[in-house]
Image (spheres, grey):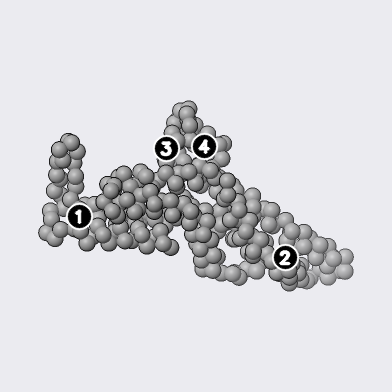
Amino acid sequence: MKFWLIIAGMLFTLVAQAAPGVDALTVTQDPEGGQTYTLTIQVLFFMTALTMLPGALMMMTSFARIIIVLAILRQALGTQNTPNNQILIGLALFLTVFIMLPVFNEVNEVAVQPYMQDQMSTMEALEAGSGPVREFMLAQTREDDLGLFARIGDFGELESPDKVPFSLLLPAFATSELKTGFQIGFLLFIPFLVIDMVVASVLMSMGMMMLSPMIISLPFKIMLFVLIDGWALVFGTLASSFQV
């Protein structure tokens, strides 16, 4: 959460520095030939960019993989809406912050703090801050997915990971996260499926055809999950799956 507070502080600083009564459409020519927009326009662009934060949180971090695994785990347990969606999202959010904390700290050191100290322009800070995020995403992206979207988008031959554009990296990373999330969910589903099959076979052999196997297998699945300390194993596996 520290990272998002820093981002909010950047926005507050921009608003505090905005001169009252400044024409929003004023463009100033600098000595090097570039153009500088008024601070009001910069705040408008920054506030617009803030609306993209939820999408960036879901598609540029570990959030997607975590929420997919937790949703499949709930389905495998057969507990219907327990835990409910709010609890699952909260667990996924805080586990995402824990996993992404080293990346956020690096972004803070190389981009946010220099920007707050007026050592970088906005574009320079964005470029510097994208480096750690790019490294994280590249480490979790499969080469097959990169090649797929490179062919679809006609990006040509990719010389090195540093040359991969964000427009190519984003869909490839999202696809890799979906694939990895379903793979982990499949492995979690198998033990509970075995329990369902055993219970169903026992009930059929006893001639209890009208009794739902899900009702009988549910307490056994919950007991197994609790005895093996399932939540700690799942969270530990998810966290370690992002280590390179």
Mark 2 or mark 3: name the one nearer the start of the chain.
3
How far apart are the two marked residues, 1 and 4, measured between alpha carbons?
Answer: 38 Å
Mark 1 or mark 2: name the one nearer the start of the chain.
1
- Residue corresponding to mark 3: 165
How far apart are the two marked residues, 1 and 2, measured between alpha carbons?
Answer: 56 Å
How far apart are the two marked residues, 4 and 2, measured between alpha carbons?
Answer: 38 Å
Identify the mark at residue 228; answer none if there is no mark: 2
Where is residue 164? Give x, y as percent.
45, 36
Instruction: Identify which residue is drawn at 28% across, 48% down.
Output: 119
Identify the mark at residue 99; answer none if there is no mark: none
Category of crowding for the residue at label 3, using alpha-carbon neighbours closer than 10 angstroms: few (below 14), some (14–19), many (at least 20)? few
Where is residue 239? Give x, y as percent.
58, 56
Q: Judge from the rendering whether residue 63 lies leftward or rightward of residue 112; answer left or right.
A: right
Query: Disc 4 vs disc 2: which is toward the camera?
Result: 2
Q: What amino acid is labelled 2 in the image? A: Ile
Q: Judge from the rendering whether residue 146 lies leftward or rightward of residue 115; answer left or right.
A: right
Residues at circles 1 and 4 in contact by the CB criterion of under 8 Å:
no
Where is residue 57? Give x, y as percent.
45, 55
How far apart are the two marked residues, 4 and 3, measured between alpha carbons?
Answer: 11 Å
Mark 1 or mark 4: name the one nearer the start of the chain.
1
What number of labels is visible?
Answer: 4
Q: What amino acid is labelled 3 in the image? A: Pro
Q: What amino acid is labelled 4 in the image? A: Leu
- Residue corresponding to mark 1: 40
- Residue corresponding to mark 4: 146
Residues at circles 4 and 2 in contact by the CB criterion of under 8 Å:
no
